[in-house]
Structure formats: structure tokens, C-alpha cells
């Protein structure tokens, strides 16, 4: 998590366009806004209240937190003891060290900073970076590897672990597939354009399919214009510095993704962090920003940009979008919405949180999303008013310096969006969206019935199961792999020290049999490792089955 006050970098975006966001002191755009509206501004309020009630963040019993801190304390003590053994030569140190003749130089390797890696991560490194040797669909094959030196190095045995159920990939709609009939158009584009462009779009890398994709994205989102980029992470980190700079204020949710944080830091703007999904915290900061202005000079901020995500990838929570939009309008700020995990995954037709809450997309100033999750491809997009997109084409570092998106990747995205919109002449896309929603609710409801503590919104396909203790995190991942279930486990420093978890990602490609198999083994491992910490009243199995069985196998 970020501290409340982050150090501002001296990087300032130069040569800003006079035609982009000409703002008065109060931050209001002088140009007229997009006139079309699908509904009245208050239409999303009832939906918002229902969505908030569907979110769960149950606290663990006190003894769990105490045992978690004790576990980290014991591991830390043993780490210092092993460092002592290495210092006296009784244990070999496998990490890089400073040479004796360079002791007076500025150190290249910070010994204290590497303490966690050396003594904690290395002991459990076998649970991450596992190599896959098949299509990463609902099931995949793993390359078997073993370590002879306690995870410092690995060697492959030449064998594979087949048919592991994939519960870790962001393949929400199942478009990471190798069906020859579905991928025919992608293969045709490789024949026509080749695999790569080898140029930026501002030079000779702008293809007709790039423009087709951007128009399709704009139509899909219901906005004026859109621009695509070859890398999802860079869509945030390289475009935010083009939108704000010195003299601007960024209000960032404390659980925002690293790409948003990096982009904010590179911009040179002042950054303030509000509590996750906490509208009181956000409004308090907006009031302070309006009343006090910039530090020392107290001049009005050039821009105030609120940055949020649609679905938060570690928590499974959904942004309180109608309330954020209401605050944005009240205080004349701008809104940057990252829909990396929500676009395609939520909403009746897969159009993300704007559709989920029934709000007007024109109320979001900057709509960002990626193609790496629901669309089975790579890259990202920025969408909004035509004025915004035209400005970014000239001033975005990703647009000016990065190579254009690969033609087969572009065609894969076009294929996926047309399928979702029904422009391919089938109902395949609608069926996948419906199946993902049903799978998500079924999986979450069964986990709650079993007694696990899970975080997030009932509509979120990201399902964090809280494990808490460091030893149980490791044991959980190993036990699940023995049962041929591939899971992603996450711990400190990626999460708070007392909230280590396993993050499950539900897909429309998962069948009921697959989910039941995963749930069966989860129930076994939960009992084996004592992971069922929930103290809430559990629904009866009969009523749960009646509620969730409808339509899942359709």
C-alpha cells in the first residue's frame, strides 16, 4: 500500500496541447460535453446500494491475527539465525555478495533488503513461476521440476503433470482457446500482415485493422473515440503522465494497481491516497483540495484526477462508481477508471461497471481497460471524448515510441468483441457472459457454505480466499497441486501482513464438473489445514443447491 504522502518526482510532461482540457480555476471544461445520455443521472443509485450490500469483508478471529504475527516472528528469528550461520561460514550463502576488494564502493546488493528474499521467499519459491507446457485454458499441463538445494535452483525431470484445473488465469470469458474454427480469421491475418509491424503507428505501423479495432471498442463502450496500445501495463503508466503534471492533484484509491501508481509517480503530480472504496475519505480530500489548494502557494489545482479500478484484482471488490461520479461532479474533478478486470467480465452484455451500475459512460472522463483478461489477447485501450483521444495520439509516450499492436493479436481482439456484441451472427458471446456470472455466483456461494472467508463482490470473478498464516499459504498451494488444482497464492508484501490469500479466477470455460471437483478438494484441504475461519451462519446445502443449479449447464 502507498503512504498518504508520496514523494513527487520532477518529471513534467512538456508541450501540452492548448486544445486539451482547457480548464478554468474550478476545473470545469470550457468545451461542451457529450450530449447523449442513456438514462437520468440518478438511475444507478438503487443498483449501487444493492451492489454494496453484496460485498463481503469478514474479519478473522483475533487468534488468527495473533498466530499470523507469531508465524512471521518465528520465521524472522530463524532467518537471523541462518544469517549468523552464513556469516561464520557454517552455511553456504547462495545469493550475490559484494567482493572483498569492493567493500569501499557504493554497495550493489543491499543485505537487509534481501533478508525477506533470502530467508522467507526462497523457502517457498516452488509455489510460484511454475512453467506451463500447454494452452492455458480451463485445464493445462505443468512441467515437473524439483530442487536439490531448498529452492535455490530447480531442475526439470522431463515429466509433465497433465490436466491441472486452471483456477489462476484471467481467462474470464474463455477466449484463450485454440479452436481452429474460432481462430481462422486470426490465422488469415497472419498470412495477410505477418506476425509483427516493426514500426510505431505514427510512422508506417498504422494498419486498417488497428483503426477498425478502435472504432469497434468505441462502439462497444458507448463513447466517442478510443485508442489502443500494445501493452496493458504501459496503457496506465505511460498515459497518465500525458494527462496530468506538476500543479495537478491525483486522488488514488489505496488498493490501485502498480501500473496506476507508477503512472501517477511519473507524472510529477501531487498524489494523495484515500481509503479503499471509502467515499467519506475521498470527499474529505476533495474538500481539502478545493479549500486549501496547492501547498505553500494555495493556488487552485490545475486539475484534480480521481483514479479508481472497476474490479480490484486482489480484493475482488467493485468500485462504488455512482457515488464516485457524484463526488466528481460535485467538486468539478475528473475521473480515471481502470477496467482491466471488469470489462467483459461484469454487466449484462459485458460492458463493465458502467453497465453494472447503469451509469452513463460519458460521466467517466477517461475509460481504460486491457485486452489481456476477458479477450484472451494483449494490450489495452483508452476511451472517452474524441478530444481526449486526439490529444493522446500526439502526447502519449506509448503512442509515439511503442511499436504498433501485432496484427494477429489485433484480429483476436476484434473477433472476441464481435462475439460478445453478437456481430458474428451467434449468441456465443452472450452465453459466455451468462455462464461466467452463473459460475461466479455458484463458486462464491459454495465457498461461503463451506465456511471460508472470502472477499469481494458477489458479481466479481476474482475470488480471494483468506489463508492468513504464512505456513498455511505454502501448504495450501502444495496440497492443491497434488490434487491437480492450479492456484495462485499471494502474501506479504503484495498483501497486508495478516491477509495472505489464495486468489481464484473463475472462467466461463469452467464446467460444473470442474468447479465441483475444485470445491471438493478445497473442502478437504480446508479441513486438513483448518482454514475455515468464518463465523457467519452458513446457508443450508439444500437451499443453496436449489438457488444455484438453475441454468448452469445450459
Image: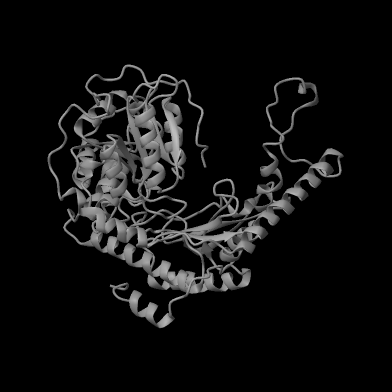
- Does residue 447 sit above or below 310 in this rendering? below
Residue 301 can be seen, yes or no: yes
Residue 395 screen position, x and y as percent:
31, 24
Give the residue drawn at x 68%, y 27%. Answer: 108
Place residue 243 in its image quadrant: top left
- Does residue 433 sit above or below 81 in this rendering? below
Tell whether 373 sits left or right of 420: right
Closest to the observer, 328 or 460:
328
Place residue 317 in its image quadrant: bottom left
Closest to the observer, 379 or 292:
292
Q: Quadrant of the C terminus?
A: bottom left
What's the colour scheme? one colour
Tell whether 46 sits left or right of 402: left
Residue positioned most to the left: 35
Residue positioned most to the top: 15
Closest to the observer, 319 or 139:
319
Closest to the observer, 253 or 173:
253
Tell whether 104 sits left or right of 122: right
Residue 321 screen position, x and y as percent:
31, 48
Give the residue drawn at x 65%, y 53%. Answer: 124
Residue 468 screen position, x and y as percent:
59, 58
Residue 80 screen position, x and y as percent:
78, 44
Give the residue drawn at x 41%, y 38%. Answer: 252
- Does residue 527 sit above or below 280 in this rendering? below
Residue positioned most to the front: 291
- Does residue 410 sit above or below 519 in this rendering? above
Residue 402 can be seen, yes or no: no
Report the number of discs. Answer: 0
Amino acid at each position: 500500500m502507498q503512504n498518504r504522502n508520496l514523494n513527487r518526482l520532477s518529471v513534467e510532461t512538456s508541450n501540452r496541447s492548448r486544445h486539451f482540457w482547457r480548464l478554468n480555476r474550478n476545473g470545469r471544461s470550457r468545451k461542451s460535453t457529450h450530449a447523449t445520455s442513456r438514462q437520468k443521472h440518478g438511475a444507478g443509485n438503487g443498483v449501487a446500494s444493492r451492489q454494496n450490500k453484496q460485498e463481503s469483508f469478514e474479519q478473522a478471529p483475533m487468534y488468527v491475527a495473533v498466530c499470523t504475527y507469531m508465524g512471521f516472528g518465528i520465521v524472522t528469528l530463524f532467518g537471523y539465525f541462518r544469517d549468523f550461520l552464513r556469516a561464520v561460514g557454517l552455511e553456504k550463502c547462495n545469493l550475490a555478495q559484494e567482493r572483498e576488494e569492493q567493500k569501499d564502493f557504493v554497495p550493489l546488493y543491499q543485505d537487509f533488503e534481501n533478508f525477506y528474499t533470502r530467508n522467507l521467499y526462497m523457502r517457498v519459491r516452488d509455489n510460484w513461476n511454475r512453467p506451463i507446457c500447454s494452452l492455458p485454458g480451463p485445464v493445462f499441463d505443468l512441467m515437473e521440476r524439483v530442487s536439490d538445494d531448498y529452492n535455490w535452483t530447480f531442475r526439470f525431470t522431463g515429466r509433465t503433470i497433465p490436466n491441472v484445473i486452471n483456477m489462476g488465469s484471467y481467462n474470464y470469458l474463455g477466449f484463450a482457446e485454440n479452436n481452429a474454427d474460432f481462430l481462422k480469421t486470426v490465422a488469415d491475418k497472419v498470412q495477410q500482415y505477418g506476425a509483427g509491424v516493426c514500426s510505431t503507428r505514427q510512422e508506417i505501423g498504422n494498419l486498417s485493422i488497428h483503426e477498425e479495432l478502435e472504432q469497434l471498442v468505441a462502439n462497444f463502450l458507448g463513447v466517442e473515440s478510443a485508442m489502443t496500445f500494445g501493452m496493458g501495463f504501459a496503457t496506465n503508466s505511460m498515459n497518465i503522465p500525458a494527462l496530468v503534471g506538476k500543479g495537478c492533484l491525483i486522488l488514488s484509491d489505496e488498493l490501485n494497481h502498480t501500473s496506476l501508481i507508477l503512472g501517477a509517480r511519473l507524472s510529477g503530480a501531487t498524489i494523495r491516497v484515500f481509503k479503499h472504496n471509502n467515499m467519506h475519505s475521498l470527499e474529505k480530500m476533495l474538500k481539502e483540495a478545493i479549500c486549501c489548494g496547492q501547498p505553500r502557494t494555495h493556488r487552485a489545482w490545475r486539475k484534480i484526477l480521481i483514479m479508481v479500478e472497476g474490479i480490484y484484482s486482489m480484493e475482488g471488490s467493485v468500485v462504488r462508481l455512482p457515488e464516485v461520479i457524484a463526488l466528481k461532479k460535485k467538486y468539478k474533478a475528473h475521473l480515471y477508471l481502470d477496467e482491466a478486470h471488469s470489462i467483459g467480465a461484469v454487466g449484462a452484455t459485458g460492458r463493465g461497471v458502467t453497465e453494472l451500475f447503469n451509469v452513463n459512460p460519458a460521466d467517466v472522463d477517461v475509460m481504460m481497460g486491457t485486452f489481456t483478461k476477458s479477450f484472451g489477447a494483449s494490450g489495452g485501450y483508452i476511451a472517452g471524448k474524441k478530444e481526449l483521444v486526439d490529444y493522446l495520439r500526439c502526447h502519449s509516450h506509448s503512442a509515439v515510441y511503442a511499436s504498433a499492436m501485432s496484427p494477429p493479436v489485433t484480429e483476436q481482439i476484434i473477433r472476441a468483441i464481435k462475439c460478445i456484441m453478437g456481430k458474428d451472427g451467434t449468441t456465443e458471446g452472450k452465453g459466455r457472459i451468462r455462464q461466467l456470472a452463473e459460475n461466479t455466483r455458484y463458486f462464491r456461494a459454495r465457498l461461503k457454505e463451506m465456511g471460508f472467508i472470502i472477499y469481494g463482490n458477489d458479481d466479481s470473478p476474482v475470488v480471494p480466499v483468506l489463508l492468513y498464516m504464512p505456513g498455511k499459504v505454502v501448504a495450501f498451494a502444495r496440497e492443491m497441486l497434488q490434487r491437480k488444482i492450479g492456484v495462485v497464492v499471494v502474501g506479504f508484501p503484495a498483501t497486508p501482513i495478516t491477509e495472505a490469500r489464495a486468489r481464484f479466477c473463475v472462467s466461463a470455460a469452467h464446467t460444473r464438473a470442474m468447479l465441483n471437483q475444485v470445491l471438493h478438494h478445497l473442502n478437504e484441504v480446508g479441513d486438513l489445514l483448518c482454514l475455515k475461519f468464518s463465523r457467519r451462519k452458513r446457508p443450508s446445502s439444500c437451499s443453496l443447491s436449489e438457488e444455484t443449479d438453475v441454468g448452469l449447464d445450459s
